[in-house]
Image (cartoon, rainbow, N blue to C red):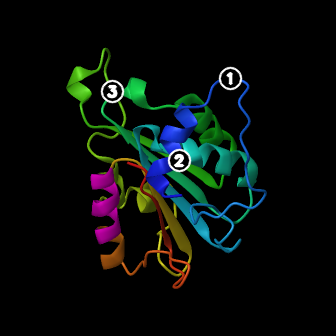
Amino acid sequence: MSETALTPRLFALSPGDRLWVSPKNRGLFTLEEVPKDKNVVMISTGTGLAPYMSMLRTQLACDRERRFAVLHGARHSWDLGYRSELMTLDRLCGNFTYAATVSRPDEEAGLWRGPVGYVQDLWTSRWLEETAGFTPSAEHTHVFLCGNPSMIEDMVAVLERDGFREHKKSQPGQIHTERYW
């Protein structure tokens, strides 16, 4: 089944319909193929954050040497789902960093005090180096990208210039993408 055929089939289900799920996941957008000694940076726009939440809830262990960072961008602060939970993790876990940015701060109901611009600006401005205390590199960091296709394409190009390589079954790399739209 193609990737585009799944969503319409799911929406066609009614409450009580049976759904078979294979016991083995087959996607590449998991932490399973990321070595345990590598840092993980998760970059998303809007609802692209959703897959990261289950990954963090099962894999994040506070105060371990492995670093996790989530960079999340949206047009407005009210579109930053899971923000409270991620801010709490940021306060409680020394090895976890969360940053949110909005691209339309002038439309906020109140004053937005966080970063402004697109989420890829957090990466190119070297925000992680200054705030999280580590410099991501292809040698010790894997980057996950999910959300707006333009952001994904922009970030893949930026990451490749920085020495990262897109992860494929035939050729492992450090860039993991979820292109669902």
Q: Which mark is residue 15?
A: 1
Between label 3 and label 1, give the one nearer the viewer: 1
The mark nearer the N terminus, 3 or 1, is 1
The three-letter code of the residue at mark 1 reads: Pro
Q: Give residue 173's position: percent from left, percent from top.
A: 50, 79
The three-letter code of the residue at mark 2 reads: Leu
Q: Which mark is residue 6?
A: 2
- Inspect the magenta stretch and tell me whether residue 68 lies in it: no
SS state under label 3:
loop
Residue sitting farthest toward the right: 23
The mark nearer the N terminus, 2 or 3, is 2
Q: Where, by quadrant of the figure, is residue 150 drawn?
A: bottom left
The residue wearing badge 3 is: 112
SS state under label 2:
helix
Front residue of this view, candidates 175 and 97: 175
Q: Tell me if mark 3 has few (under 14), some (14-19) or many (20+) residues whose alpha carbon lies within 10 angstroms of its own.
A: some
